[in-house]
Image: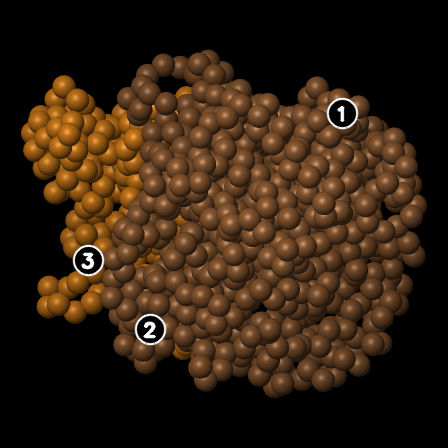
Chain colours: A orange, B brown
Amino acid sequence: MNELAFFIDYSRCIGCQACVQACEECDTHRGRTMIHLETIQRRETVQTAPQVCMHCQDPICARVCPADAIKKMPDGAVQSSLKPRCIGCSNCVLACPFGVPKYYGDIDQMMKCDLCYDRTSAGRRPMCATVCPSQALSYTTLEEIERTRDGVPTNVWRFGDEVVRTKVYVVLPHKAPAIHVDVIRADGSVAHPASDRVDDVAAILEMG
Amino acid sequence: MSALAKPPDSIPNLVARYGPHRHDAPPGGWSAVGEPDRVVETHCCFCGQQCGIRLKVRDDKVVGFDPWEEFPFKRGKLCPKGVKRYLQNEHPDRLLTPLERHDGHGFAPTSWNAALDRIVAAMKRIQADHGPDAFALLGGASFTNERAYVLGKFARVALRTANIDYNGRLCMVSAGAAAKKMLGIDRSANAWDDITKADVILAAGSNVAECSPITTDYFWRARERGAKIIIIDPRLTPIARTVDLFIPVRPGGDIGVFNGMLHVMIGRGWIDRAFIEAHTTGWDALEATIRNYPPERAAQIAGVPASMIVRAAELWGPATSSFLLHARGIEHHSKGVDNCMAAINLVLATGRIGREGCGYGTITGQGNGQGAREQGQKADQLPGYRDIENPEHRRYIASVWGVPEESIPHKGLTAVPLLEAIHDGRIKGLLSFCFNPVVSLPDGNYIRRALERLEFFAASDFFLSETARYADIVLPAALMEEDEGTTTNVEGRVIHHRQAVPPPGDARQDWKIVCALAERLGAGDKFRFESPREIFEEIRVASRGGIADYYGITYDRIDREFGVFWPCPSPDHPGTPRLYENGRFGHADGRARFQPVDWRPAAEEPDAEYPIILTTGRVVSQYLSGTQTRRIGGLVAQYPQPRCEIHPKLAATLGIADGDFVRVESRRGHIVVRAQVVKTIRPDTVFVPYHWPLDRSANNCTIRAIDPVSNIPEFKICAVRLQKVDPPTDPIAALAPEAGGVE
């Protein structure tokens, strides 16, 4: 299988926002960026995290859309809302487990990452994955990622009992059957304690 | 002396007229539709990576960009500056005509003839009254090779002044001096591909994620095949977050790390004695010096635990292949050359250079940081890296130029002493290109006073920079995409910048400006260039037989081969991606030279009165003094104003919370900026990026101390004190942040 796919490797992200700036230049949504770059907790760390649309195999945004305005293409890319159909209800904005779709009041329409359909459908890489200087975002084959990267690509997510499979992969440091996103348990305890990585320079100097 | 030449109108008035203003959208706005008329393959104008980009052009205006995926060095990768740089061509702040100062009223447009006549009249008057060296020139590493060459020739042949230097003096000179002294050639020793094949990478004083972003991918490609990465930096930078060993060195303590590592390596036998014997000189003296740097003492100098230095030696020492990189973090010191030499000792001691996966590089900061230091606009150089004091070199260049050897001036003043000579009245006139010293040189208040004392000052730039506000005449220059030419990237690869569009209005290419001035000075016959290609043909000849030999390089070859690496002495020579193969170094005897280096303190260490170290640097969305990038909306929005990074421990002792305004004060000046409380910096050090002007200029605080060899300023360490203050409300603070205000 030599199918091209999109991979996010958070460990490589340097927070430079080349993806954010370049996305804005795409012809289908010029002046609006469809990628979100999160600064996790700047006081504690320089870690940042890019978020493109994950392109769910069974897209929740499309399921909850009362106007049937969100279409999945044969290759699995989930499109932005269709302008004539979108009623601006923001159901998709609320339903997306990854927080991707955004409602734009000035055009009364939801827009989101469509995996640069104009580029990828013509065999080119999406804009963000092309410019990404650290290749935290990359568009290549699963084989190539497995050959050249230390981490393990995964596209299965667990939100509580719900399993979501996505077209977009994330590269994890270690093999895991799925990514658990239920960070806070019902009793309020933290499911996944913070990483043991210390980004406090004072602590690093003390530890030696 | 005439009255002080302060800016001819209030700062807010000048900002209102000339910016910096944010410009967000391409010509016609985001909703403009239509295919481009053409797409031009060229390179980003900013840092030394010189990433390939394709500029979309419609109606002779740059309207957008597309990644250039075929260019091998970067395969389409760009940072945010590269993405947004296209917005400069149609920027509303562009200078479209020459301007003339009218005191009290700002600037008024004038004609090219009137502007050039006034400059030449001032040159002649000042040189007649005060001698030829009383009129100085400043150039820049944003110049193409062609522009740098023409300006250097103009200084020596037309204006006949010794005093020409360039803003690369703030960038590459420590690295250059060290590499030349030890390896014989001032150039990164390898093409970047060798980074990916190294088993261990050591990067010192280099925030690659923000200052050379695409190099991050080279590190990762090595890492994914098992390479270990060592980062030496006072701040935990984005690349440092993930590496195998991060050494948070105290600013100025780098020699402690390098010498301490070598001490451990000698003790454990991780030294290539056969290589040292066959290909180097000076090992015994180095070994004697290193005896004084056991890890415990080295650790005191470096301000880190000794265990880190031992661990670094354990990673670096026994490796079979390695790559060492350094940048301004170790170079911007009054011991910058020594810092670099201590680092290069680690490369030579292991013999790991000149073969696949083994090498050394310095990461050029400015666009043409490499090429602009080869073509003869440095105070002490002639084209082809020739030495202006070497009689043989002088004779050769004199023959190329068709002038008597004795007519070529000798070595002049470098940038900081040149500004000091202006301050002290020894230099009376200045013509400056793409240099913004009131933001970029240390001790900003002193630099401003110096410019006020000039009898005549002319500046050429795309926009009215903070420095150009002091000028009598301002010339509107052309951007990289409005000119043609070559630059030489971080790897020593000579590349081709194609002209995409004509300059807007009456803006003009700098080389044309220089040739027009030469004509008026009576040297027009030496400057009959019709195009950059003609200038390049002369560079080929002028550099022939020199260290940076371009003779075999042509524009056609560059286009065909995606760039050509110098030295390339003949048209059938393939170019030289990797230097020093088979242990053959650049010195006449072919041997590299070890250099023993002892640590010494900075010009100004913290004390009871000013107890905190200030270090300065860049952020990813801004470039140098910000003349260009503080005008691009998306880049301003990303990081609008400088912030003072401070560790929570230090912040707590000073009662400073995140977002508070703090006054950062040194013996020379102060700034008021917002605090950013972060754990990713040493508690004894604060960091402020330097891209902003006026009361936000970190260089108000930095010290005017320079390295005795390279004359690079000590931007990376000075002593300051911090105090929480109320939000500033003065007229400067009220400006937009890109102009020097606060948000």
Q: Chain of mark 3?
A: A
| Image mark for residue B524 | 1
For the residues labelled 1 and 2, the Cα–Cα distance comes to 57 Å
Read off the residue under disc 3: A182
Residue under the point 83% across and 28% down: B571
In this orientation, does residue B372 appear? Answer: yes
| Number of residues whose C-alpha sits closer than 10 Å to that of mark 1, classed few (under 14), some (14–19) or many (20 or more) | some
- Vertical order, B154 against B674 (above or below): above
Residue under the point 53% across and 23% down: B111
Residue under the point 30% across and 48% down: B735
For the residues labelled 2 and 3, the Cα–Cα distance comes to 43 Å
Which image quadrant is residue B282 in? bottom right
Query: Which-is-in-front pick, marks 1 and 2?
Result: 1
Read off the residue under disc 2: B723
| Number of residues whose C-alpha sits closer than 10 Å to that of mark 3, classed few (under 14), some (14–19) or many (20 or more) | some
Amino acid carrying label 2: it is: Gln
Q: Secondary structure at mark 1?
A: helix
Which image quadrant is residue B709 in? bottom right
Query: Which-is-in-front pick, marks 2 and 3?
Result: 2
| Residues at marks 2 and 3 touching, judged by CB atoms closer than 8 Å | no
| Number of residues whose C-alpha sits closer than 10 Å to that of mark 2, classed few (under 14), some (14–19) or many (20 or more) | some
Which image quadrant is residue B491 in? top right
- Vertical order, B673 against B368 (above or below): below
